[in-house]
Structure formats: structure tokens, C-alpha cells
Image (cartoon, rainbow, N blue to C red):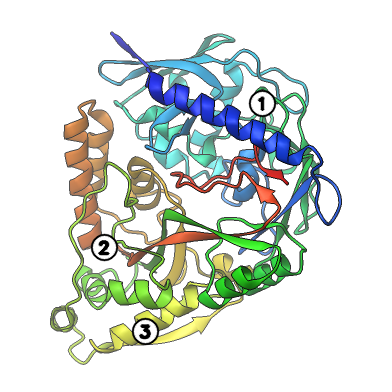
Amino acid sequence: MFQPFKTDPSRRQFLQLAAIAGVSAGIAACSVGGSSHGGNTVRVGFGSTRGGAFNLDPAGPNRLYEALAALYGYVAVLDDRYQPQPDLVTDWTMSTDATRWSFEVRGNVGFHDGRRLTSSDIAYTLKRVLDPATGSAGASLLSPSLDPSGVTTPDPRTLRLELKAPNSNLAATLASYQFGIIADGSGSEIAKTGIGTGPFKLEKFPPGGTVVLSRSDSYWKGPALLEELHFTPIADAGARVNALLANQVDLLYSDSLAPADLARVQAASGCRVVRVPSGTWDVIVMNCAAAPFSDVRVRQAFKAVVDQQQMLDVVLSGHGRVADNNPVAFNDPLRASAPSIRNIPRAKQLLAEAGYPNGIDVTLDVAPYTPTFLPLAQAYQQQAAEAGIRITLRQHSADNYVAETFGKANLYLDYWGPRPAAQVLNEVFFTGSVSNESHWSNSEFDNLLNQARATTDPAGQKTLYAQAQRMLADDGGAIIPVFEDIGRAVRTNVVNFPGKNQPDARPDYHTLALS
């Protein structure tokens, strides 16, 4: 028996009314819109740690994440309660055992090149994500329950998924950024063409330079309010702020601001800061595949030295929340964790038991990619010293940081945007995931995630995810002291920029506008 997707009528009506009101206000504000640099264009400054080697493939490892929501549509999108809502489909049904799913594909959607969306395009997208040759982090979310052979298209409007293992979270999974829908057979060119079904289409994509998108007048929700979006990579966080103050960019994408930069933006004429409570988390990654972090006692010692409240106060000036070594967002209904209490004697004892009675010397790799990285590294260096953990900071350039450290260094900083519990636990910590940067592997943890994915009982699922979170916090290779509020710096003439917390932190480019 299939269970139909149902939308809360009051919620649906509220969203419709809010959207109508917001769009109407945006049109009124922008009827004579434009900007000081000419044209109805918003210029986005974003950080790039990939040496300019980003591309437009939503499934790939070097995607230009900041532009994905402008170029692509998805099977589903998440609302502010982490619940999936239809996007490129109008409805879905799930069998009572969560092994069969059926999706009704929206009929009025076109790609930027004029092709019409069919179920074959969605099927192709999913199979491509599952293909190991694609190297997609999305494969770790789908492959435990779906093989390519389980993807079928009975007709152009129907997609069916026959799962090899139950997955009650499938609709929410398909809202992840890796599952941007591309046209059947377009995978070999998508990294350069960016042809999707989103509100903007690609105009210019110079290597390492400013990416220019123009409004797609055939977008199924109606034309966007802006004519163009420009995405300019600026690796250094301070340089991005300078570009905003010099009116070279109009907004900084999901950017955290150092206190000094925050004060500069707030004091500057024509600029403002939007503070958004967020599940974005900074992490000190320990490589569990190599000594000394292959020893759980060392990992636990390195966690036990952390004074989370001090980091929150000193590094973030109080703009955030303690995280307790748990990446599941503070406002996720599935979050469950125990407080992580600083314990220096315990850290020393664990190090001694692991063979380091006189302390340990390690190198922590860091770069000024975000304003929080260096202050957090310095705060951790000072806190850890009390337990005999002697840390040398090795600084990299922001532009090459990921290439030089990701999955390679023994101890380094990274950060992740908010993701629903099922996604972040599978994507970043499941054994074998391409995004498992700590190389942590725990079969009991993996089994808990598999069981949680299979159950259709909400209470039982919450219990299983809670057990997984506590296991990760205790045994895993991630030191996660804080969630940081997103300080989005924008020019004052940018309107409809999101001011509420969204699980995936995507701006709505369809309604983004200039006053």
C-alpha cells in the first residue's frame, strides 16, 4: 500500500500568501530598479578554495555551490521544518515498507536549451550520481538503498524507484544540492554548460573568473526579478569584505564576518549585515586512518580539552551556539546530544593511556578562508596546551587550502553548511563516503544509520539517529565546538535576501532583487 505525500494546508496557504506578498513587494521596489554599477544585476562575492578549478556540475566534487540554486531545480526542496516539499515533481507516494517510491513529474518545466523535462531526465540524474565515475558525495546518500537498476520510467510523467533496502528519508535526500536535475545524456558537458531548469542560465564562464548568469524567461515559476547574477571568486575573507565596501560586489554569500569586519560593514554607508541563526559548523578534522588519531583515546583527549563557551565568546563574539561535537543542527527535530564538558585531567589520562604520558606534538593546518578559521585554531592551540597537547599552526593560502589538506592532512580546519540529520550523518561520516574527510569508520554507526533509514516509525527513527549522534560525538574524528550564525553582508539596495534560517542556507534567487 502506498502512502501519499500530503502538504499541511495551512502551511501551504501561508507559503503561497507569503510568496505572493514578497514577490509583489519586490516588483514594486524594483520597478525602477537597478544599481549604482548599472543594470538590474546582483554581484555575488564568494570564497573559493579550489584555485579557480570550480565547475557547474551539481553532482561533482568541485561544483560552484553558490550558483546551484540559480541554475538547477530539484525533485524536492526542504522547508524551514526540514520537511521535503515538491519542486520538479507535483506529488510522490511511498509504500508502507519504504521500498517503493513513485513520483509524478511536473509537466510545465523546460531546460535552458528548450528541452522539456521528463522522467527520463530525473532518472538519468540519479543514475549518474550513483555512478562511481562521477565521484559524487550524493552517492553515499543513495547507494545504500538504491541501485541504478531500480530506477524506471513507465512514462514521461512518472518516475519509479524500487529500492534494495528501505529508505523513508528518500524525498528529503533528493533535496540535497548534489541532485540538481540535468537533461538526459548531458553529463559530459554539464560542468561547462550549467544547463538546468533554474531561474537563471549561463552566459559566461571564464576559468577562475566571474561567472555570469542571465534570467531565464521560460522558468516555470515565472521570470526572476533580476536580469543577471554575477559570481566572483575571492578567496581571502578580508578581501571579500573590502570588495563589498568598495561597491565591487553586492553581497557576500553565506559569509561569516570577523568582529572587526562586522563593525566595518555596519559603519559603512550603503551596507548592512543580516544575521541568520544557522546550523553551520566549524570542525577540526582528525585523520582517523593515521597515527595518532587512529587511537580513539587520542581523539577523545583532543575533544576533552575544548572550552566550547570560550570559543563561542572569543571566536564568534557570542553569535552562535555550542555544538557538543554533533553536526546535526540545533533546530533539527532529530538532534540529540549530551553536553561536551571540558576535562583537562581526563585528557591527560587518555593521552597517557595512549602512550603519550608527556604530552604530544601535532601540526594543525589552517588558512584564512573564513574569518573564524585562524581565531578558532589559535583558541584551540591555547586550550589544548593545558593538557600537554603542543600544537604548531601551519598556514596555507586560502586559494589552495582544500587541495592541500582535504583528506590528506592529519589535523586541519573545515566547515560545513547546515544539512538535515540523515544527510549530514551519511554524507560526512558513513564509511566510504567521498566526503568522509576524517576517514572514520564504525560499523555500528553505519548499521544505526541503515536501520534509521529503513524505519517508517518517527519515534523509532529519532531514537536510532540519537544513538548515532552520541556515538559520533564520543568516538568520531570531528571536533565540532560551535554552530556559527551566518553574518551575511550586503549592500542596502539588495532586497528579499533571506533573513530566516533555512536548512540548506540557499538564497532564493528567483525573488532576489534590487531596490
Q: Position of residue 306 (x, y in %)?
A: 27, 75
**Camera-nearest label, 3 or 2:** 2
Secondary structure of the residue carrying numbered label 3: helix
Task: Tell me if I can see residue 8 in this picture.
Answer: yes
Q: Residues within 10 Å of mark 1 (few under 14, many from 20)?
A: many
State the residue position of label 3.
381
Q: Which mark identifies residue 169? A: none
Placement of 89 over or under 31, stated as above or below: above
Query: Which mark sits nearer the N-terminus, 3 or 2?
Result: 2
In the picture, measured across the screen, residue 302 lies left or right of residue 272, that is left
Q: Position of residue 454 (x, y in %)?
A: 25, 29
Placement of 470 over or under 12, stated as above or below: below
Q: Identify which residue is drawn at 35% across, 80% down.
A: 380
Query: Which mark sits nearer the N-terminus, 3 or 1?
Result: 1
Q: Nearer the viewer, residue 392 or 333?
A: 333
Query: Which mark sits nearer the N-terminus, 2 or 1?
Result: 1
Q: Identify which residue is drawn at 44% across, 72% down.
A: 412
Is there CB contact under 8 Å for labels 3 and 2?
A: no
Position of the N terminus by quadrant? top left
Secondary structure of the residue carrying numbered label 2: loop
Looking at the picture, which amino acid does disc 2 mark?
Asp
Q: Residues within 10 Å of mark 2 (few under 14, many from 20)?
A: many
State the residue position of label 1.
183
The residue at the far right in this view is 38
Q: Position of residue 413 (x, y in %)?
A: 44, 70
State the residue position of label 2.
324
Q: Identify which residue is drawn at 74% across, 43% down.
A: 192
Task: Tell me if I can see residue 362 in this picture.
Answer: no
**Camera-nearest label, 2 or 1:** 2
Where residue 198 sits, quadrant-wise, is top right
